[in-house]
Image (tube, grey):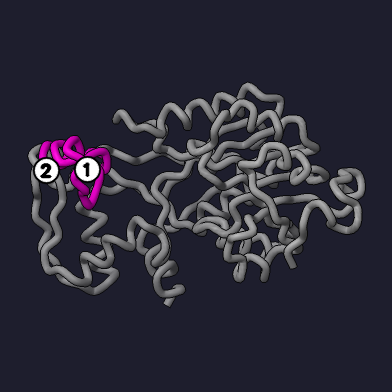
Amino acid sequence: GAVDISTRNGLGSCGFFRRIMKDLIVIGSAGFTGRRLCLILMQKGISFDALVRESTDTSLVEQYAEDLVLGDITDREKLADLLAGYERCIHIPNLAAVKDVDRYIKVYEDSDLKKVVFVSSTNMFTKLPASTKPRREAAEVAIMKSGLNYVIIRPTMIYGGEDDRNICRLVQIIKNWPVFPVFNGGRAMQQPIYVKDHAQALVYALISDETNRKCYNISGKEPFTYQEMVSRLATVLDERIKIISVPVAPIYSITRMLERMHIPVPFRSEQLLRLVEDKYFDHQEAAKDFGFNPRSFEEGIIDGYWGGK
């Protein structure tokens, strides 16, 4: 059940007693990747606590976690108490959203934690003027400058279910429309990662001694063009579609104009440019250091949407 940090075991925030009892805390356990991570940890017999907000739907997480710890990582005053006594941590929330990231990472550095796995993103390598890029870079610099024994995992686009906010949108278009438009011939390279492969990588990165104070890009089994991704998806879905190429430049210009006029648009202009940017990344370092071996795109789609059926 959920435990309030101030009254837990009658020990308040006494780190010594909690350290005897606890090892791993997962932050971001109720999210898209977090729920899959919790299941994998339970299946591997790894005991853990899950840090959750009071308002979070924990119906799935509480089946897997030993305890739910109520708290909010944005409350810096209580964060140190929340981390007290734990030796390992998997941190999934978006680091680009963290304010005053140096102070935030310092709390982890000053804690009892012996190893922390942070999730970043390959988005930080974009050539586009993305608003999140400098914040992601600042977060990684803060982590690397700290005395923490850290691992930084940077996934590519994550997919794997009706709640993935990425591939599921393409699935809906393919199922409901006979024509699928791709920008600039759909030539941009993609290498999306299946969410369970991402979650598994977090576990292996935590366990392996080879990963200490290192950063890893993780991606799907192989790269392919955006057009090929759509074609593969249609094949798996057993749908026949006609793919047509649309030039991105005029649509981008119109979208930018509407944005400047503060007129709502269904997608941001930055998202349009991301669709024609190459997003493929080698994962050989992860394969070498902790045995990362992702499944194919088709295998991920079948498992993610039909449970392997």
**Residue 227 bears which disc, if any?**
none
Q: Position of residue 227 (x, y in %)?
A: 20, 52
Q: How far apart are labels 1 and 2 at the CA level?
A: 8 Å
* Three-letter code for the amino acid on which mark 2 is drawn: Ile
Q: Residue at x 67, y 71 (%)?
A: 63
Q: In the rendered structure, which disc, 1 or 2, sits on the residue that comes first in sequence?
A: 2
Task: Using the image, determine if residue 307 lies above or below residue 279.
Answer: below
Report which residue position mark 1 lands on: 272
**In-image side of 143 versus 253 (left or right):** right
Q: Position of residue 295 (x, y in %)?
A: 45, 58
**In-image side of 264 versus 36 (left or right):** left
Task: Using the image, determine if residue 78 lies above or below residue 3.
Answer: above
Nearer to me, 95 or 150 = 95
**Residue located farthest toward the front when viewing the structure as drawn:** 262
Q: Residue at x 57, y 59 (%)?
A: 30
The image quarter in which residue 238 lies = bottom left
* Total numbered badges shown on the rendered structure: 2
Q: Residues within 10 Å of mark 2 (few under 14, many from 20)?
A: some
For the record, the magenta segment spans 253-274
* Three-letter code for the amino acid on which mark 1 is drawn: Leu
Q: Residue at x 53, y 57 (%)?
A: 31
**In-image side of 195 versus 67 (left or right):** left
Q: Residue at x 91, y 57 (%)?
A: 10
